[in-house]
Image (spheres, rainbow, N blue to C red):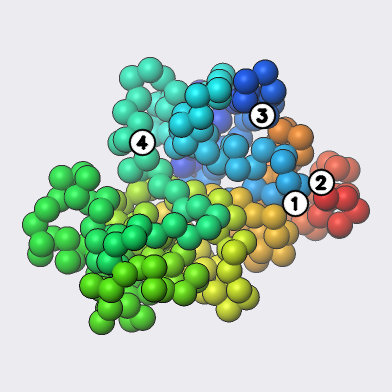
Amino acid sequence: MTSETNGFALKTQGLNLWYGDKQALFDVTMGVPKNKVTALIGPSGCGKSTLIRCFNRMNDVNTIVRVSGEVWYEDRNIYAPSTDVVSLRKSIGMVFQKPNPFPKSIYENIAYGPRIHGIHAKATLDGIIEKSLKNAAIWDEVKERLTESALGLSGGQQQRLCIARCLSVEPHIILMDEPCSSLDPIATVKIENLIDELKQTYTVIIVTHNMQQAARVSDFTGFMYLGKLVEFGVTDQIFENPHEELTERYVTGRFG
């Protein structure tokens, strides 16, 4: 694998990660196709969330983490010393497992990111907020409530608000770490439909413990086990005709 990322939103090459003395990722090499949904599946503790957090260097906040190998984005290794991590996280945004709106108004939640990046004109912010909320499929539900606290929204609305907050700084890649795990079935359907719409503009990488969800929403799937990427391929192939016996055992429910 070279620094050329043509056709891929990002690539990893020989990626390893340690928490102190414990190795959590082992030699992960993969390419994430542009404008597709890629799902990472596997049993709890297999390294899915650790891997996705490598893609925008969220693991950096843990002082005992050490990383070797490469993650290529826009033909540069994001682990190079010259990387501007703030700029990187603008381009590669993240939505977390549990909705985490700020204790501010709906408007201020969305305006927060653009303001950090130097946008302060109210007319410009108004436009960004409307566009972001529309793209997150929540504008019609909140357009009359923009000055109200985001904490008053339902769980599913809060998660779509957090997606809108991510979209407000115009990322290229959206990372989603178990975005539906705390939501009811109706809210989950809305998020899944939204993910399908988002890939028209963005590359989406989703971690999920729910294999049915991975099969529904993703174009590509990677199966992880004990920190290793066992198999990666088109989602239909992974679920219907896996190449590795371990993958076949997992997707048919014989372990995990």
Alpha-carbon distance for marks 2 and 3? 18 Å
Q: Which residue is mark 2?
A: 247
How far is mark 1 from mark 2, CA to CA? 8 Å
Circles 1 and 2 in contact, beta carbons < 8 Å: yes
The disc, 4 or 2, on the residue closer to the chain's N-terminal end is 4
Rendering coords of residue 181 (x, y %):
62, 61
- Amino acid of disc 2: Thr
- Looking at the rendered structure, the kind of residue marked 4 is Leu
Q: CA distance from mark 4 to mark 1?
A: 31 Å
- Residue on which disc 1 sits: 238
Secondary structure at numbered mark 3: strand
Q: Looking at the image, which residue sits at the far right?
A: 254
In the image, taking residue 140 as reference, residue 231 lies left or right, namely right
Sequence-first tag of 4 and 3: 3
The residue wearing badge 4 is 88
Left or right: 80 in relation to 21 = left
Q: Residue placed at 59% from the left, 55% from the top?
A: 178
Q: Which mark is in front, 4 or 1? A: 4
Q: Sequence order check: which comes first, mark 4 or mark 1?
A: 4
Measuring 32% from the left and 77% from the top, which residue is drawn there?
A: 142
| Label 1 – label 3 distance at C-alpha | 21 Å
Q: Which mark is residue 25?
A: 3
Q: Mark 1 near mark 3, Cβ–Cβ under 8 Å?
A: no
